[in-house]
Amino acid sequence: MAGRAKYWASESSSSSGSETESEEIVVKKTIQKKKKVVQAIYTDDESEDEGRVVRNLKDRRFDELSEHIKKARNMRKINDFSALLNTFKDYHTTLSKTAKVIEKEGLPRFYIKELVELDDYINAKWDDKDFKKKLSKQGSKGLTTLRQRLRKYFAEEPKTAEELTKYRENPDASEEEEEVDAASSASDESDDSMSGTSDESDDDLSDSGSELSGSSDESESDSDSDFDSDIGDDPDNEFARYTIEYFLKKDKTSSKADKKVRKEKKKREQKEHKEEEDDDWTAVDPGTVGKGDLKILLTGEVQIFPKDVEINAKNVVQKLAEITAMRTPKEADRQNKILFYKKLREMAIEAKTGLGLEIKIRLSTISACYDYNPKHKDYMSDESFANALSETLELVQILNKNHETLILSDNVQDDEESLTDQPNEDGKWHCRGSLVHTCTKLDTEYSKLLQNSDQHSEEYRMRLSNNCKIMQIFNEGTDWALLQADKQQICQMYLLKIKYIYYRHDSQKGAEGSQELIEKFCKYIYTNDETQRIRTQAILYNIYNLALHDKWFQARDLMLMSHLQESIHNADIGTQIIYNRTMVQLGLCAFRMGQMEDAHQALTDIQSGNRSRELLAQGFSMARERTQEQEKTERRRMQPYHTHINTELLECVYLVSAMFLEIPYMAEKEFDSRRRMISKQFHYQLRNSEKQAFVGPPDNMREHVLAAAKALKVGDWKKCIKYLINPKMNQKVWNLFAETDKVKDMLQKYAKTQSLRVYLFSYSQFYDNISIDWITENFDMSSSEVQSAVSKMMINEELKASWDEPSRSLVLHKTEPTRLQNLALQLASRLNQLTESNERLCESKQGSNFTAFYQSNRMRDWSRNNNRRF
């Protein structure tokens, strides 16, 4: 029994042990599964908490304001006042949204600091006169507007001004330190909130743990202890970091020094971690700019080739192609490209790779100077233009120096170019390019610079001073073309030179002898030019210059012989603009020479439609609507300001010439129903002036001319001259002529002559004869002038009269009816028209019988009256 009991005891013990082992295995598996599920759930919750951040209204608004401040600081670095003005407007928009927060908290200190910095920056730039001179029109306008807005803002917000004063007295820490403190305080608050919740959860866990321990078995307690030991031993376990210290409350009164230490430690750890990750990458010097071998170091040194590379013609050609293929989307990239070209040229000259390569690199450098983004600006910067100017001048000088051994032409093929250190078989360096095209591009970009600058600013004067350098380039380019004996290139270079001197009078400084030069250049173009366009423009420039120097008959004959007025509508728009300017100058020349009819005829087409500024490419007419693209195209055709023709002078000359033609014609054809108008514009102005009930003293140019016309209409030449020649008119109009006194004398003589004509047309029917002495005394004219004027009227059959030499008088034949007779004739003709209209009306209503009856009665009455008379 004892053995059996012992046997069964051992068996039972072994079975119970196996059962417990199996139970332990099952429990461990279930616990591990629970651990994995709990861990997965916890990590998901943690990731969601990290991805979702709840921020209050104050933080959102202040962050938005901080972004605007960062943009403003960047704009101040590049002096972009337009963008800075827009950012200043964004300040007000953001502050209006943050009104409730500002009422509670007040203005943030970093915003006060930004206003102080902005105010100091604006005042410094405003006081810097040299900086203001270099500013563009848009930049100057932006600086002025921003300064006014800032002053207005401080005046309207006295509290803000007080805050600025306090800040200037005691400036606080930098904005970055404030942001660090704010971030650290926010993290402490979050830690405190987490510790509070963890303490509560810890208490709950401890309570539940005590309850479970009182009701659990020993096996369960063992399994729990094993579970806890597993959690603590596993370093990768998620719960390993939740120790007692984690759930303890932290001291909220920690100093700022501790916070900074923790922050610096965190940054240092992040930096070490980043360095460990970036071990496989090569660090790049932040001061270098460029790609590959092309670099610009922080010291300003330009690197083209690696140190061990031999510099020869082949490597220079490859590097030239590499630089040319560079994409330059930004302005800084384009400037770097020019630096690469210059450095490559220096190295090529030092290595003596050949003159052909040097010229090739210079042409590429000039082309890179003209490379700019037309979407941002329609013209190149002053720095780029000065660079192109100096490069072009050096190129022309090299060409003249080596004209015997250097050939530059568009006809050179790619395989004929001298891209080695030795010339071609003929002993000359061949290079593909065109000096004429380079000079033409320089002229085009120079015109764009002048078009896009304020005409009354110092900037325009500075840009205009480049005329001398450009003329020097054209002179040396012309010399090179003459040495090459290429007639077409010579014609093109001559035309470029004419373009810069044709509008200048010999009385101006530096324009002496321009007439002889233009005549010489134009004769060569007339003989050797193969294109119609260059010859046409040369003729127009020549006519303009002749008219400018009062050579009326030569200019008129050249215009009539060229027949340009018949074919100019087929020319391009640029040539048509030159034609319009030439016709205007012809009209002004005719006016100065006293040829009023020719002057009026030349100026009629320009002045008739109120589009003189547009036709002369000096501005836009407001009445015409145009798209943005059309306006942009027309702006490119605008003439530089220093070549403009004064439109007020042009209108005055047109109105005065129309007055001297129209007023005598009106006096001659006063009662002629078929009278035509010579000038519709002058008629319109005169009619509106006569309609006014009260006319005050004349103020502007047009009113002076109309007042003179009214005086001329009654033959009062003294008042006419008084209104035409006075200090106000001299300042606005007549002093603009080169020979002012000559023009004034011509006006006085012409006014006296036309007053005499008007007087004779109006009052000749009241005289039998008029003494010549009386005419000379009243009109302040010599007897020869009186006889000349009156004889012309007789020859043209405008006046029916004859001279009586013994009595020195003018005998009037009185063939013309008097004023009363003319009025009676007009009344009779109108009554006749009224009778005929009544007869037609009666015929349409009563029929043909009534008309026949009416006509028979009229015939009977007529015969009866005649019988009584005889």
Image (cartoon, rainbow, N blue to C red):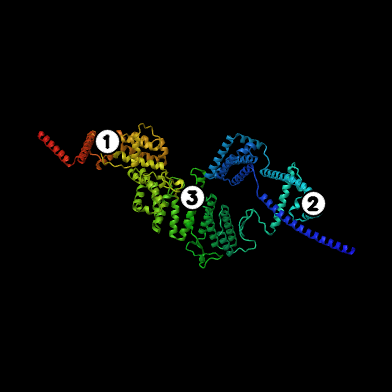
- Tell me the CA gap for discs 3 and 2: 96 Å
Pointer 2 residue = 216
The image quadrant of residue 791 is top left
Q: Secondary structure at mark 3?
A: helix
Q: What amino acid is found at the position of numbered circle 2 in the picture?
A: Ser
- Counting other residues with Cα less than 10 Å from the Cα at mark 1, is it few (<14), some (14-19), or many (20 or more)? many
- Residue 666, numbered label: none
Closer-to-camera residue (269/522): 269
Query: Residue 622's x, y, as percent?
Result: 42, 44
Q: Quadrant of the N terminus?
A: bottom right
In this rendering, the label closer to the viewer, 2 or 1: 2
- Tell me the CA gap for discs 2 and 1: 140 Å
Q: Secondary structure at mark 1?
A: helix
Q: What amino acid is found at the position of numbered circle 1 in the picture?
A: Ser
Give the mark nearest the N terminus, 3 or 2. Answer: 2
In this rendering, the label closer to the viewer, 3 or 2: 2
- Tell me the CA gap for discs 3 and 1: 56 Å
- Residue 762, numbered label: 1
- Residue 448, numbered label: 3
Q: Is residue 782 above or below residue 533?
A: above
Query: Residue 495's x, y, as percent?
Result: 43, 54
Residue 475 in sight here:
no
